[in-house]
Image (spheres, rainbow, N blue to C red):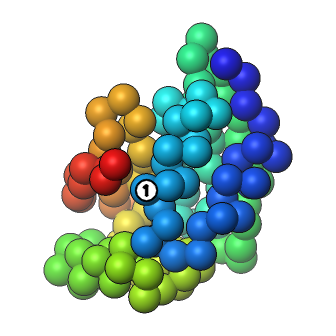
Amino acid sequence: MMFTLEQIKTAHAKVKSGADFPNYIQDLIGLGVVFYETYVSDGHTTYYGTNDYQISAAPVYETLIIAPETNLLVFKKELKAHQQGQTDYLTFCADCARSGIAKWTMDMKKKTCTYYDRSGNEILVEKIPG
């Protein structure tokens, strides 16, 4: 199943906060997305489908500097606030950068979201609700 950036943008436009995230994931699964990775430095994302299909979205904001040290306690607090709808996407990305989070991946089959530091180490793995 092939999907387009336009379809993904339409699904993403419905997301106002982290509280809308589970529905967004369901929309992406419906489009055929099986995995994606988002880079905190500029927000660019690569989406993967079946049969080695992939498509990349351009950066969405000015470059953020990723902190060299990861602060897991602060990150978990900011992630929880975002998931509860207290912060928007850009605020969450800035929070990630300050906490040393360089990227996250979403695996639709495993239903996990994994956060990584600048060296590519797994920092936190969360189950995707829904």
Instruction: Measuring from the top left, give residue 78's x and y in whole percent.
Output: 33, 82
Asked if residue 21 can be seen in this view, the reply is: yes
Q: Of the residues shown, which amino acid type is indicated by label 1?
A: Pro
Q: Residue at x 50, y 44 (%)?
A: 26
| Quarter-of-image position of residue 42 | bottom right
Expressed as whole percent of the image width and height from the top left, the position of residue 112 reads 31, 44
Q: Locate residue 29 relative to residue 14 in the image: left or right.
A: left
Q: Residues within 10 Å of mark 1 (few under 14, many from 20)?
A: some
Which residue appears farthest toward the top when viewing the image? Answer: 51
Q: Where is residue 95? Give x, y as percent.
A: 43, 82
Q: Looking at the image, which residue is at 24% across and 75% down?
A: 76
Residue at 71% over, 73% down:
61
Q: Please state, as top left, top right, bottom left or bottom right, where the N terminus lies in the image.
A: top right
Foreground of the two, 23 or 93 = 23
Please give the residue where the numbered disc 1 appears in the rendered image: 22
Q: Nearer the viewer, residue 56 or 26?
A: 26
Does the image show residue 65? no
Which quadrant holds residue 99?
bottom left
Relative to 51, does residue 35 appear above or below in the rendering? below
Asked which secondary structure carries label 1, the reply is helix
Question: Which residue occupies 49% across, 67% down?
Answer: 20
Residue that lies at the very extreme toward the bottom in this rendered image: 86
Of residues 69 and 18, the one drawn nearer to the viewer in this rendering: 18
Q: Is residue 1 left or right of residue 75?
A: right
